[in-house]
Image: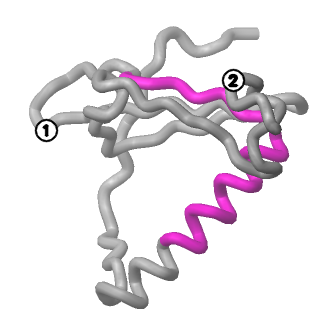
Amino acid sequence: MADEKNPQNNKKGQINIELDEAVAQGTYSNLAIINHSVSEFVVDFVNIMPGTPKSKVKSRIILTPQHAKRLAKALQENVKRFEKAHGEIKDYEKQPIPLNFGPTGQA
């Protein structure tokens, strides 16, 4: 008889993931800024509103390069499924957003 309180006895491949109420509400973002080093990818999510001169990073996700690649693949697959069900997502040309994250480096 399996011990149900022992997480190691869960069926192979199953993960128990909890989603608390605050996180479930989500955070709106209309800009993602991606930086990387040899060991990690950093994705900053920003909500830029028209007419406001300043915006703050709302969320930062740090990923290993392998997880970043898996995320890119998963997003690509989900976009394909979405477009198959709902039609092509239009990618409208937008003016580049000027970004100012502080002083620039000097030599």
State the SS at label 2.
Answer: loop
Residue 50: give x, y in percent of width and height: 13, 38
* Type of the residue with mark 2: Lys
Query: Neighbour class for label 2 at 10 Å: few (<14), some, many (≥20)?
Result: few
Q: For residue 16, what is the image quadrant?
A: top right
The Cα atoms of the two marked residues, 1 and 2, are separated by 52 Å
* Type of the residue with mark 1: Pro
* Mark sitting on residue 5: 2
Where, quadrant-wise, is the N terminus in this rendering? top right
Q: Is residue 64 above or below residue 87?
A: above
> Nearest the camera: 45 or 35?
45
Q: For residue 31, what is the image quadrant?
A: top left
Marker count (numbered): 2
Residue bounds of the magenta highlight: 58-78
Where, quadrant-wise, is the C terminus in this rendering? top right
Residue 49: give x, y in percent of width and height: 17, 35
Q: Is residue 16 above or below residue 6?
A: below
Residue at image location 76% in from the left, 24% down from the top: 6
In magenta stretch: residue 76: yes
> Nearest the camera: 55 or 17?
17
In magenta stretch: residue 85: no
Q: Is residue 77 above or below residue 97?
A: below
Can you name the residue that lies furthest to the front here? 1
Q: For residue 99, what is the image quadrant?
A: top left
* Mark sitting on residue 50: 1
Residue 3: give x, y in percent of width and height: 77, 29
> Nearest the camera: 84 or 36?
84
Residue at image location 59% in from the left, 70% down from the top: 76
